[in-house]
Image: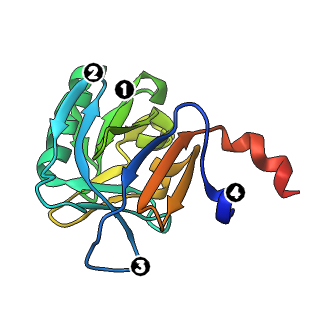
Amino acid sequence: MNFGGDAVIHGENVVTTALVEGGDKTFYFVTLQGVSVGNQRINANAGRGGNMFIDSGTTVSLVENSVWKRMGDLISEAVGLPHRLDPGGTFMCYEAGGLRERFPDITFHFAGGADVVLKPTNAFTEPTAEGTVCLAMQATNGTGIMGNLAQHNFHIGYDLVGRKVAFKPTDCSSHLGVLS
């Protein structure tokens, strides 16, 4: 964890979006304008700013119900596989033969032009022993959440004075030596 000037994220591929006021002061709210599956965009209900918050304590991401349903259809088209709900009825899953790499990138489009590209490892679960891969996102009728799976391999910086959050793709495994 870095503070002060060390907390500012610099370099190539850094994107920023505004932090907005939300109902709960313990979360960092942002405005999700849309989600893309590959190059096909689905607009979100961004009319109310602060429709998503970033939470490292939540494993999967939550996206608005209508966006989630359309994502399932677009993913099916992209990979040529039908989707089905998991036995609990909360995740969209695909019989993918264990090949998570065949799935498309998912992009979160935040206000201000901050496009955060989630690779399949960020957006889909590890394959089960049977080869099933599930979208690591669930539907919500409430506020969306960018969960910790979506945050893997991103350097994320919160500028509370400037009221913005920055995302920079990184290989977090290359920083393991710093911790020892």
For marks 4 and 2, the one nearer the N-term is 4
144 vs 173, left or right, is left
Q: Is residue 36 above or below residue 20?
A: above
Distance Cα–Cα, label 1 vs label 3: 33 Å
Quarter of the image for the C terminus: give it.
bottom right
Q: Give whichever of 81, 50 is nearer the camera.
A: 50
Mark 4 belongs to which amino acid?
Asp
121 vs 178, left or right, is left
**Circles 2 and 3 in contact, beta carbons < 8 Å:** no
Residue underneath mark 3:
26
How many other residues sit within 10 Å of disc 1, few (<14), some (14-19) or many (≥20)? many
Q: Nearer the viewer, mark 2 or mark 3?
A: 3
Residue underneath mark 1:
104
68 vs 148, left or right, is left
For marks 3 and 4, the one nearer the N-term is 4
Mark 2 belongs to which amino acid?
Ala
Distance Cα–Cα, label 4 vs label 2: 40 Å
Task: Residue at 43%, 46% (x, y): give it.
Answer: 16
Quarter of the image for the N terminus: give it.
bottom right
Residue 78 is tagged as 2
How many other residues sit within 10 Å of disc 2, few (<14), some (14-19) or many (≥20)? some
Label 2, secondary structure: give it.
helix
Residue underneath mark 4:
6
